[in-house]
Image (cartoon, grey):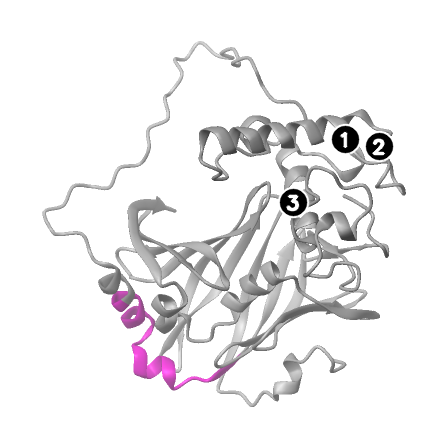
């Protein structure tokens, strides 16, 4: 991590580490080299991409910031690992440029796999049993033609209750709990068509908020000023806020194609791979039997690689003729939490001010 003009704040949200950098310090129009002190290898990237890049590197190596940086003097070059990291980033960039046409195929994780030092020797066998080779799952052969993208999406909409039933609901209040780091915390999720959403976690030391107001995302907590999300964060939460997601997938992701079927939790799933402006690339998994969305994996692009977020949906229940997942688990390389809903109220009256960053909650 590198020191900006003003100090950064680290918050713990739902068991995950979130890097809070003041917007005055990270102007989207400036580069990392113009905004932060002593940035060399990543100096030309947008300033808002530096912290996500540093976070991904720490995940790839399984280390904390202090592994490379001097605590309290983040711009210092006194530590050897920092100089090594710069050389390794330059090497990785050159490999991608020379061998992959500039595509981000090689990353820190390619060699480190969550360890400070990459493995260069195969591990020895630790039992007398023969090693079991990894065999990728293969979908069962079928005489029926593979379903098209439109057929997969139509089955999903029908499984939820149909387009008419979906449109009859325009707002939703969900209450339940979030399980993270061995503890359960009460949570409320307010959503409103077409694309407003706020999650309120009622922690022991106050509430924390994660929201999308229809145009931009923001985060805050009791006793701290709210801050706007970066464009990458905002794009991800905008997707979560899509009230009629099932009906708008093709619109949100104009480049949508069918992938190979995969097995998730013992169920064979159809896979769709999508990309589109303003949203992160995604992979969507639909249960072949029920047609319901089982998993979404979205990817945050950074200059040093893709950072995945996986959301698994389950416990679908019908409320007012529309099925809603009552349980979902969000997993990232550096953390994981599960939300279990206990109560859902559709078409509740929700004032738009609930989603506004400037309003005290």
> Could you say whether the residue bearing mark 1 is in a helix, strand or loop?
helix
> Can residue 209 be seen by looking at this rendering?
no
How far apart, in angstroms, are the residues tagged by discs 2 and 1? 7 Å
Mark 2 neighbour class, 10 Å CA radius: few under 14, some 14 to 19, many 20 or more: some
Question: Which residue bears the numbered disc 3?
Answer: 53
Query: Considering depth in this image, is 312 or 344 the residue closer to the camera?
Result: 312
How far apart, in angstroms, are the residues tagged by discs 1 and 3? 14 Å
Q: Are marks 1 and 3 in contact (CB under 8 Å)?
A: no
Question: Which residue bears the numbered disc 2?
Answer: 77
Residue 256 in picture, x, y percent from top left: 33, 58
Is tag 2's residue or tag 1's residue first in the polypeptide sequence? 2
Residue 237, quarter of the rendered image = bottom right
Is residue 63 rendered magenta in the image?
Answer: no
> Could you say whether the residue bearing mark 2 is in a helix, strand or loop?
loop
Q: Are marks 2 and 1 in contact (CB under 8 Å)?
A: yes
Say above or below: 15 vs 99: below
Q: Is residue 164 left or right of residue 211?
A: left
Query: Magenta segment range?
Result: 154-172
Residue 105 in picture, x, y percent from top left: 48, 36
Point 68% across, 61% down: residue: 28
Residue, far left: 143
Question: Which residue bears the numbered disc 1?
Answer: 82
Q: Is residue 249 left or right of residue 25?
A: left
How far apart, in angstroms, are the residues tagged by discs 2 and 3? 19 Å
């Amino acid at each position: 991590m590198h020191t900006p003009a003003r100090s950064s704040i680290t918050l713990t949200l739902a068991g995950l580490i979130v890097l809070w950098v003041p917007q005055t310090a990270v102007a989207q129009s400036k580069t990392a080299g113009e905004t932060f002190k002593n940035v060399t290898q990543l100096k030309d990237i947008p300033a808002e991409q530096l912290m996500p890049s540093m976070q991904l590197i720490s995940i790839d190596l399984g280390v904390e910031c202090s592994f490379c940086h001097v605590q309290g003097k983040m711009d210092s070059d006194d530590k050897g690992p920092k100089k090594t990291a710069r050389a390794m980033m330059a090497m990785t960039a050159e490999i991608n440029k020379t061998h992959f046409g500039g595509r981000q195929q090689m990353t820190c994780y390619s060699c480190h796999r969550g360890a400070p030092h990459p493995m260069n020797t195969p591990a020895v066998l630790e039992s007398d049993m023969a090693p079991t080779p990894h065999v990728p799952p293969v979908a069962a052969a079928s005489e029926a033609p593979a379903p098209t993208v439109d057929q997969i999406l139509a089955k999903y909409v029908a499984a939820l209750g149909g387009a008419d039933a979906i449109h009859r609901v325009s707002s939703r209040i969900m209450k339940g709990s979030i399980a993270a780091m061995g503890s359960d915390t009460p949570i409320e999720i307010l959503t409103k068509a077409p694309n407003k959403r706020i999650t309120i976690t009622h922690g022991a030391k106050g509430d924390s908020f994660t929201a999308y107001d229809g145009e931009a995302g923001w985060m805050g907590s009791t006793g701290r000023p709210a801050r706007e999300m970066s464009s990458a964060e905002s794009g991800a939460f905008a997707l979560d806020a899509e009230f009629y997601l099932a009906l708008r997938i093709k619109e949100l992701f104009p480049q949508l194609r069918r992938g190979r079927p995969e097995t998730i939790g013992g169920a064979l799933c159809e896979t769709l791979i999508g990309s589109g402006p303003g949203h992160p690339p995604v992979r969507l998994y639909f249960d072949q039997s029920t047609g319901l969305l089982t998993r979404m994996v979205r990817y945050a692009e950074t200059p040093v690689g893709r950072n995945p977020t996986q959301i698994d949906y389950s416990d679908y229940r019908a409320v007012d003729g529309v099925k809603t997942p009552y349980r979902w688990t969000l997993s990232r390389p550096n953390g994981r939490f599960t939300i279990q809903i206990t109560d859902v109220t559709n078409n509740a009256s929700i004032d738009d001010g609930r989603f506004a960053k400037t309003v005290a909650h």
